Image: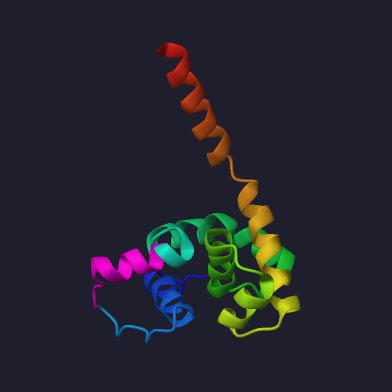
């Protein structure tokens, strides 16, 4: 897990987007960042943070076989919501493999307390107005 960095998600994302990975210590432009968010809904830093929240559960569920690209597959599916045939072709795997990782990760993300905290903040704002 210690070898997983923000750059890992950035480079894996570029591969899924059909672009070449960047060399070490290169920054990326706002255009590439916009394209990344267009494909995955979040920036590489948020991917990294989600990964660290999910890692322990993913390790148990997949017996250590979960990889950063699997999180990107799930985020891509949530953002683009193509059919699984299309998304699995983009990912370069068969539908069964795509489903195996995508839906479990989506389920684990849905367990985050962030959603309830956000809803509580929105409700408290509407009550105070």
| Magenta extent | 26-37
- Helix, strand or loop: magenta stretch: helix
Question: Is any atom of residue 69 visible in this view?
Answer: yes
Q: Residue at x 58, y 74 (%)?
A: 67
- Give above or below for 96 relative to 107: below
Q: Residue at x 50, y 34 (%)?
A: 118
- Give above or below for 81 relative to 108: below
Does the stretch in magenta take in 72?
no
> Where in the figure is residue 83, as x and y percent of width and height?
66, 69
Q: Residue at x 45, y 82 (%)?
A: 15
For the residue pair 30 and 27, the one nearer the viewer reads as: 30
Question: Is any atom of residue 63 visible in this view?
Answer: no
Left or right placement of residue 81 versus residue 3 in this view: right
- Viewport quadrant of the C terminus: top left
- Quadrant hosting residue 77: bottom right
For the residue pair 129 and 11, the one nearer the viewer reads as: 129
> Where in the figure is residue 78, as x and y percent of width and height?
57, 59
Q: Residue at x 56, y 39 (%)?
A: 115
> Where in the figure is residue 114, as x and y percent of width and height?
53, 40
């Amino acid at each position: 897990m210690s070898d997983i960095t923000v750059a890992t998600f950035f480079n894996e994302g570029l591969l899924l987007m059909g672009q070449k990975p960047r060399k070490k210590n290169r920054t990326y432009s706002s255009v590439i960042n916009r394209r990344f968010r267009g494909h995955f809904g979040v920036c590489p830093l948020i991917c990294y943070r989600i990964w660290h929240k999910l890692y322990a559960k993913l390790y148990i569920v997949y017996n250590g076989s979960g990889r950063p690209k699997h999180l990107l597959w799930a985020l891509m599916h949530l953002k683009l919501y193509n059919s699984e045939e299309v998304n699995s072709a983009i990912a370069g795997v068969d539908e069964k493999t795509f489903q195996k990782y995508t839906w479990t990760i989506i389920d684990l993300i849905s367990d985050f307390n962030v959603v309830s905290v956000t809803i509580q903040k929105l409700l408290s704002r509407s009550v105070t107005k």
